[in-house]
Image (cartoon, helix red, strand yellow):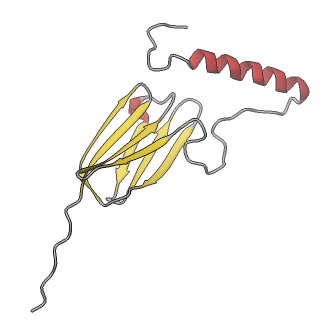
Amino acid sequence: MRRDDRDEPFDDLFREIERMMNEMMNGADANVEFNSSSNVDNGFGMDTHVDIHETDEAVRVIADLPGVEKDNIELECDGKTLTISASSDHREYDERVSLPQRVNEHTASATYNNGVLEVVFDLAEQSSDISLE
């Protein structure tokens, strides 16, 4: 294990647990596979958590993306929904997060550090009344 790999401090531990589980399960049935990128449409999977925090000025989305490199993350927003697409060696992530309020997607800022993605949006301007003449 490389001590310089601070982004994934438990990566070797999880890999070893998966190896032991595969070894144990393959003894009973050689066709058993542990594949974290299953075809079940459950977003990021059970090991990933998405939180949305709302204030009077902004909406903040925080998502855990374990094992993903920064260059493998794509973000898109239409003002109502944030789409997070990411990939790692072991899985593909594709999640659509409904935002609690309309946001200004053009002022968004995003950071990614130690497997945690944080995206901050300013709230969209309220639409003005239209006077009928």
Q: Is residue 83 above or below residue 109?
A: below
- Residue 42 at x, y percent in the picture: 60, 49
Q: Please state if 20 lies on the left or on the right of 45 as rendered.
A: right
Q: Please state if 17 lies on the left or on the right of 4 as rendered.
A: right
Numbered marks: total = 0
Q: Please state if 41 lies on the left or on the right of 84 as rendered.
A: right
The residue positioned farthest toward the left in the image shown: 133
Identify the residue at image location x=34%, y=54%: 77
Residue 110 picture quarter: top left
Q: Please state if 27 lies on the left or on the right of 40 as rendered.
A: right
Q: In which quarter of the image is the N terminus?
A: top right
Identify the residue at image location x=49%, y=49%: 95
Q: In which quarter of the image is the C terminus?
A: bottom left
Q: In this view, does 24 lie above or below 99?
A: above
The residue positioned farthest toward the right in the image shown: 28
- Residue 12 at x, y percent in the picture: 59, 15
The residue positioned farthest toward the front in the image shown: 56
Of the pair 59 and 27, the residue shown nearer to us: 59
Identify the residue at image location x=36%, y=31%: 112
Identify the residue at image location x=44%, y=39%: 63
- Residue 5 at x, y percent in the picture: 46, 13
Of the pair 46 and 75, the residue shown nearer to us: 46
Q: Is residue 38 above or below residue 18?
A: below
- Residue 32 at x, y percent in the picture: 81, 33
The residue positioned farthest toward the bottom in the image shown: 133
